[in-house]
Image (cartoon, rainbow, N blue to C red):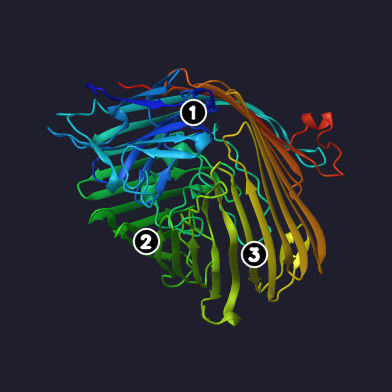
């Protein structure tokens, strides 16, 4: 049903064993995979290329996302909508109210939306689709979606949303590891505004001024035992909505646009964003994304991105991107541009996705236009899942707003997975990569991938036995061969230095993780064998307890012990999370992290209250303390609490206005 302002969708879920229905989560945007849940998909452009996804569980927890292309699911998007749930002796019911303002669509006298529904029954690990063309396609195969008709002359209401905010912040005095003051504390306030304007029914503009992301959860700590940079995901809401439209490249390897280059320095510390704007959406066969932001402080710069895509065939496109950074003062202008084409096909019921991209950059101090490109073919299906790619990344390739893990290389990656469904011994699906292993081989740009003497790094993995059980548990037994040829010494961990050379080694791996829908679940990972001329063992343990819908406790420990010719070390990383959900609109999250590389423990506590959908109140406290053995004030000594390495308390209130 619908009226002038919203769609109303009711989903009835019958169940023969109502007491066995799983429902743990209450928090907005929580992962609902541990629960029974329902997802509805609305392709409001009715173009089989993108969709909005809304989900809930029997508790009424809300989750939403934007989907585009073949597999781009942006779970960080937040729409303004609501859902009501109820239970009875024969099952449970969810009624969704989706305001038309949450959707983007073409005005017309016979408006139609693409549509699908997915129900997941956790205890059975069962997925049911309202409309599907088989396991190889699934819920997000938009060519198989159904339709909502009879909507008539549907029009979006007046499209302007304004989100003013006010913030108060108390920053503690920072100290070094011996307890001496380094930066004084202060108390201050700040105000700013975000706005969303519908330029046309299918094109939206976002504006932000005096931007602040104090409520964003801290990055997860890592211990990097490689000689290459680590990729951290974006968490700031302004950069997440429709972020897939600005993508070109390969995530976590080569990206022309990596939004963390704006408003964050290389250490992850905030840089003030004075103002920014973004336009995104669709004009006929064109998808358009434009972003511009001006940062202040020591990183006084203007950053801009323009991305376009033009539809081809049913789901394919050809696209282009340009990025630019002007400043900081005296550093000139750096640019990058790229082209890509994506051709997802279905041939006799099987998926095949050839894809090509090429890009170049111009950076002050670097001559010419270094290039990067990739050719790939993906063949993801239920029985066989195959992939092959070839990269070339020139030395000096440096997109100013991008992320590049390695340059001056040739690279090939791929895998051939055989995944039968035997239907015996409680096994749902097996997964083998044998006798052909998965691979990732990198050679110097002056060499050849066909000559192992030219390889800089190589990784091969044979999955001799793996898969999923019918109860949702996952298991793997793997054998690996690895190679690294560092040309310079590098610090693998706390002054243990790997010398230049050519190292080959073999490793073994076991994994087992329990169904996350259980009240108490565990996971274990162990990888052991040779390592840079010596030996090492990696152990990872995880556990989670879900206490009846309000309390969720999870913890994880990663420990690496190594004995090498150049020294020995033990690396330890732990993270624990406590969540208490009062209801579907208020929750407290406490996150504690420790690692013995930085020798510090960090606390991050966040209270989030949603008075009405669209408004937010955040209370955030974070603080870090040294754990150095020789420190004068070492955590958990109570005296250390008054001498944090850093800390702050923030109150932020956001109010949604629809003039």
Alpha carbons under labels 3 and 1: distance apart: 40 Å
Residue 592 image point, x, y percent: 69, 35
Answer with mark 2 or mark 3, whichever residue precedes in sequence. 2
Residue 49 in view of the camera: no
Residue visible at 60% across and 63% down in the picture: 464
- Of residue 562 and residue 475, the one placed in the foreground of this image is 475
Which of discs 3 and 1 lies nearer the camera? The answer is 3
Q: Where is the C terminus found, in terms of image quarters? A: top left
What mark, if any, has residue 337 been given in the picture? 2
In the picture, measured across the screen, residue 223 lies left or right of residue 37, that is right
Q: Which quadrant would residue 145 be assigned to in this image?
A: top left
The residue that mark 3 highlights is 479
Residue visible at 42% across and 43% down in the picture: 74
Q: Which quadrant would residue 205 be assigned to in this image?
A: top left
The residue that mark 1 highlights is 28
Q: Residues within 10 Å of mark 3 (few under 14, many from 20)?
A: some
- Of residue 215 and residue 607, the one placed in the foreground of this image is 607
Which of discs 2 and 3 lies nearer the camera? The answer is 3
Which of discs 2 and 1 lies nearer the camera? The answer is 1
Answer with mark 3 or mark 1, whichever residue precedes in sequence. 1
Residue 556 image point, x, y percent: 68, 42
Residue 475 image point, x, y percent: 61, 51
Decide: is 416 above or below 211. Answer: below
Residue 215 image point, x, y percent: 54, 31
Mark 2 vs 3: CB contact within 8 A? no
Q: Secondary structure at mark 2?
A: strand
Residue visible at 64% across and 64% down in the picture: 479
């Amino acid at each position: 049903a619908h009226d002038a302002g919203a769609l109303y969708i009711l989903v009835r879920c019958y169940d023969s064993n109502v007491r066995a229905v799983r429902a743990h989560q209450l928090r907005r945007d929580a992962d609902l995979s541990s629960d029974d849940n329902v997802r509805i998909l609305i392709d409001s452009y009715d173009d089989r290329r993108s969709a909005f996804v809304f989900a809930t569980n029997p508790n009424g927890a809300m989750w939403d996302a934007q989907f585009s292309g073949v597999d781009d699911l942006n779970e960080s998007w937040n729409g303004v909508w609501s859902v009501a749930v109820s239970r009875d002796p024969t099952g449970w019911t969810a009624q969704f109210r989706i305001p038309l303002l949450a959707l983007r669509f073409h005005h017309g006298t016979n408006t139609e939306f693409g549509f699908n529904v997915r129900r997941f029954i956790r205890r059975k690990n069962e997925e049911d689709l309202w409309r599907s063309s088989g396991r190889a396609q699934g819920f997000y195969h938009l060519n198989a979606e159904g339709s909502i008709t009879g909507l008539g002359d549907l029009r979006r209401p007046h499209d302007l949303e304004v989100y003013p905010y006010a913030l108060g912040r108390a920053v503690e005095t920072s100290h070094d590891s011996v307890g001496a003051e380094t930066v004084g504390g202060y108390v201050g306030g700040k105000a700013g505004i975000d706005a969303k304007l519908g330029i046309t029914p299918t094109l939206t503009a976002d504006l932000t001024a005096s931007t602040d992301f104090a409520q964003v959860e801290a990055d997860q700590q890592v211990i990097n035992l490689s000689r290459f940079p680590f990729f951290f995901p974006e968490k700031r809401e302004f950069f997440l909505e429709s972020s897939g439209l600005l993508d070109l490249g390969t995530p976590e390897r080569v990206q022309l646009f990596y939004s963390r280059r704006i408003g964050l320095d290389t250490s992850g510390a905030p840089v003030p964003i004075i103002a920014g704007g973004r336009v995104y959406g669709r004009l006929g066969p064109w998808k358009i994304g434009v972003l511009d932001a001006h940062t202040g402080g020591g990183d006084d710069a203007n950053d801009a991105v323009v991305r376009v895509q033009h539809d081809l065939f049913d789901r394919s496109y050809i696209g282009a991107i340009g990025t630019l950074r002007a400043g900081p003062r005296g550093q000139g202008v750096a640019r990058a541009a790229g082209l890509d084409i994506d051709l997802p096909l279905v041939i006799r019921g099987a998926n095949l996705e050839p894809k090509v991209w090429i890009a170049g950059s111009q950076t002050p101090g670097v001559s010419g236009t270094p290039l990067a490109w990739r050719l790939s073919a993906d063949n993801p299906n239920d029985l066989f899942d195959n992939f092959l790619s070839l990269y070339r990344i020139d030395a000096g390739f440096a997109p100013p707003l991008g992320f590049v893990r390695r340059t001056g290389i040739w690279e090939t990656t791929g895998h051939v997975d055989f995944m039968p469904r035997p239907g015996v011994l409680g096994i749902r699906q097996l997964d083998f990569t044998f006798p052909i292993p998965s691979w990732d081989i990198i050679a110097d740009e002056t060499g050849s991938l066909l000559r192992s003497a030219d390889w800089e790094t190589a990784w091969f993995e044979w999955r001799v036995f793996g898969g999923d059980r019918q109860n949702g548990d996952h298991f793997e037994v793997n054998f690996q061969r690895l190679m690294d040829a560092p040309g310079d010494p590098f610090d693998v961990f706390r002054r243990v230095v790997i010398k230049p050379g050519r190292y080959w080694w073999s490793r073994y791996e076991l994994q087992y993780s329990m169904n996350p829908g259980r009240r108490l679940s565990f996971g274990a990972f162990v990888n052991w064998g040779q390592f840079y001329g010596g030996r090492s063992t990696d152990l990872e343990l995880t556990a989670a307890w879900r206490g009846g819908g309000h309390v969720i406790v999870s913890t994880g420990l990663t420990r690496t012990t190594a004995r090498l010719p150049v020294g020995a070390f033990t690396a330890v990383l732990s993270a624990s999370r406590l969540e208490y959900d009062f209801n579907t609109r208020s929750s407290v999250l406490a996150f504690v992290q420790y690692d013995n590389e930085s020798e510090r423990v960090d606390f991050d506590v966040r209270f989030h209250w949603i008075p009405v959908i669209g408004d937010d109140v955040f209370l955030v406290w974070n603080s870090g303390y040294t754990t150095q053995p020789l420190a004068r004030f070492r955590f958990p000594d109570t005296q250390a609490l008054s001498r944090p390495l850093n800390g702050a308390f923030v109150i932020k209130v956001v109010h949604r206005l629809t003039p």
